[in-house]
Image (spheres, helix red, strand yellow):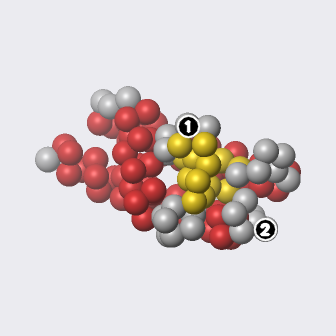
Amino acid sequence: MQTLRSWIALGFVLAALGLAGAASALDLDGAKAQGLVGETTDGYVAAVEASPSEEVERLVDDVNGRRRASYEAIAKKNGTPTATVAKLAAEKLLHKAPSGAWIRDGGRWYQKK
């Protein structure tokens, strides 16, 4: 039952994460569509370019701050390490990422096929 609650909570977090940054001029979905931001295998987003604009940096910081807070809350509730929650979220986010989305595995960027 604890695992089911964890997955339900993670689902709510992922839904909320899709809205993260929506109030900014550049939102997460838009930045992903433009190839400015991609998902990482550790559950966070990163700028694809080596020298991103300040707007992209702010977006990445905002999204990652919200994700970190969500992951920490779920981890605390379930007595699980935050990194484990982040890794599970990454698996779900990467699975649902569309073809062509940028993904960083370690230090290497690639586009999902």
Residue 54 shows in this picture: yes
CA distance separating discs 2 and 1: 29 Å
Q: Which residue is mark 1?
A: 106
Residue 44 shows in this picture: no
Residue 89: % across, % down: 41, 49
Residue 83 position by quadrant? top left
Residue 63: % across, % down: 62, 51
> Is residue 82 shown above or below 111?
above
Residue 110: % across, % down: 58, 53
Outermost residue to the left: 1
Is the residue marked by circle 1 packed among few (<14), some (14-19), or many (20+) residues within 10 Å?
few
Side of 108 where 76 appears, left or right: left
87, 49: nearer the viewer: 49
Residue occupying the point 67% across, 56% down: 37
Of the residues tagged 2 and 1, which is closer to the observer? 1
Residue 102 position by quadrant? bottom right
Residue occupying the point 71% across, 50% down: 47
Residue occupying the point 84% across, 46% down: 51
Which amino acid, by three-letter code, is at mark 2? Ala
Q: Are marks 2 and 1 in contact (CB under 8 Å)?
A: no
> Is residue 80 shown above or below 88?
above
Residue occupying the point 28% across, 47% down: 6
Side of 6 where 105 appears, left or right: right
Residue 39: % across, % down: 56, 52
Which amino acid, by three-letter code, is at mark 1? Gly
Is the residue marked by circle 2 packed among few (<14), some (14-19), or many (20+) residues within 10 Å?
few
Q: Which residue is mark 2?
A: 25
**Total labels drawn:** 2
Mark 2 lies on a secondary structure that is loop
Mark 1 lies on a secondary structure that is loop
